[in-house]
Amino acid sequence: MKSFKRFVLFLLLSVFSITLVACGGNDEDASDDAADDSSDEKITLDFWVFGATGYDELLKEYEEENPNVEIKFKTSENADHHDALFTALSAGTGAPDIAMIEVDQLDRFKQAQDRFVNLYDLGAEEVSDVYQDWAWDTANSVDGDFLFGLPTDIGPKALYYRIDVFEEAGLPTDPDEVSALIDSAEALKEVAVQVKEETGKPFVDSMEMAYRAYLDAAPESHLNPEGELLIEQEGSLVKKAYDFAVELNELGVVGNFDMWTPEWANAVNDGDFAAELGPGWLKGWMEGNAPDASGLFRVATLPQEFSANWGGSFLTIPAETDHAEAAYDFIKWLTSPENQLKSFQSHGLFPSAPAVYEMEEFKNNEDEFFGGQVTSVVFGEAANNITEAVYKGEMYVSVNNEILTALTNVQQGADPEEEWEAAVERAKALVSR
């Protein structure tokens, strides 16, 4: 039922996108906003986010520095936030002045370009070198003429591993040695088998995490910008990721701990699997939710073929706003390197601004949970190793869920090729609607 409602919303948004004209995305409107926002008149900005960002604390600093600006802050759960924003944009009323959009959702909202302010019209090109190139490119339209948002946090991936499990398996535990040892997909498989044989424990927690090893690194995976379904084509990168997960499962090195479930949380805490191919933001969760694992995890870089980003968000300005210039000034301030460092220190949001990686507070940020290792440097290196933006497409989540269903069935004993073909057929039906 929830998928059907989202589909209806998508149709409504498509209709509105064709029939309505942007109300804040041109130079004339931006100039008018600049004139209004430069006055001493009190300006109120509605700011919608999801999750625990800590931005409610940072905005107080901004309000002190800009006494004519009041920012009304609203946070919701991820799905509720994006659904509410989608509904408001579809209706043409009720959208905030500033909206945070998660990277997996961004291409869906790009279909309603006329509902957003083009940040290039507000001078965003001047700050393009502040952020990772690939993160900046992710926020661009396909033709590169329209910028939807400024990157906030990102999710460079690395290898989280349990040193007690590695020791029991007769493997090195020093991060540099682990990085040198697991330097390819083949090397990862060999280590995974050794862990299983020596400890009886799986190497990775779930089929999804095994699948994401290759998937997250694919520049185009499920669909291309023309809306063509890529998973059924020869050489499909999604099929490669799927086959890798199936192979690891056949080797017996994949656990059955689905992320965010109580069983998974207990497994992280108790060391019931050896490693997680996870993003930088996972570190904050582990520190707060796996107390018995403190000191037992380390982080190493992944092989280049698995170098990827998982997660992150962008701050956008819906065209409905009456204060585009003021909204832009705020999001530029909030995503500056100095404030990204604060967000990293307080809430573990990994910075999209490479300048932060050179700051002493970042480079000397020892993690007690990780045995005193400075994990931020590892993730900074991982972020710099990513070479290009990833195109997901507006139906990424729906299509990807069909693949995940197939992998779940495979782990329960179903035939991998039959499950793949069935998933492709379900995906084709989704795309053709």
Image: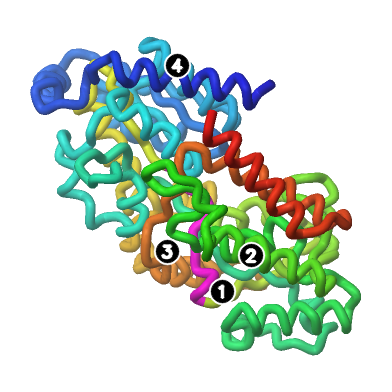
Residue type pointed to by label 1: Leu
Q: Residues within 10 Å of mark 1 (few under 14, many from 20)?
A: many
The residue at the point 74 percent across, 54 percent down is 407
Q: Which mark is residue 76?
A: none
Q: Please report whichever mark, 4 or 1, sits nearer to the chain's N-terminal start.
A: 4
Q: Is residue 388 left or right of residue 263?
A: left
Q: Residues within 10 Å of mark 2 (few under 14, many from 20)?
A: many
Q: Which mark is residue 12?
A: 4
The residue that mark 1 highlights is 302
Q: Is residue 130 above or below residue 191?
A: above
Marks 2/1: CA–CA distance: 8 Å
Q: Residues within 10 Å of mark 3 (few under 14, many from 20)?
A: few
Please tell me whether residue 145 belongs to the stretch shown in magenta: no
Of circles 4 and 2, the one toward us is 4
Q: Are marks 2 and 1 in contact (CB under 8 Å)?
A: yes
Foreground: 170 or 115?
Answer: 115
User: In the structure shown, which secondary structural element does the residue marked by tag 1 occupy?
Assistant: loop
Magenta range: 304-313
Give coordinates of residue 234: x percent, y percent. 53, 62
Whether residue 54 is visible here, answered yes or no, is no
Marks 4/2: CA–CA distance: 38 Å
Of circles 2 and 3, the one toward us is 2
Q: Residues within 10 Å of mark 4 (few under 14, many from 20)?
A: some
Q: Please report whichever mark, 3 or 4, sits nearer to the chain's N-terminal start.
A: 4
Q: Are marks 4 and 2 in contact (CB under 8 Å)?
A: no
Marks 3/4: CA–CA distance: 47 Å
Q: Is residue 191 above or below residue 366?
A: below
Marks 4/1: CA–CA distance: 42 Å
Give coordinates of residue 12: x percent, y percent. 45, 16
The quadrant in which residue 133 appears is bottom left
Q: Please report whichever mark, 4 or 2, sits nearer to the chain's N-terminal start.
A: 4
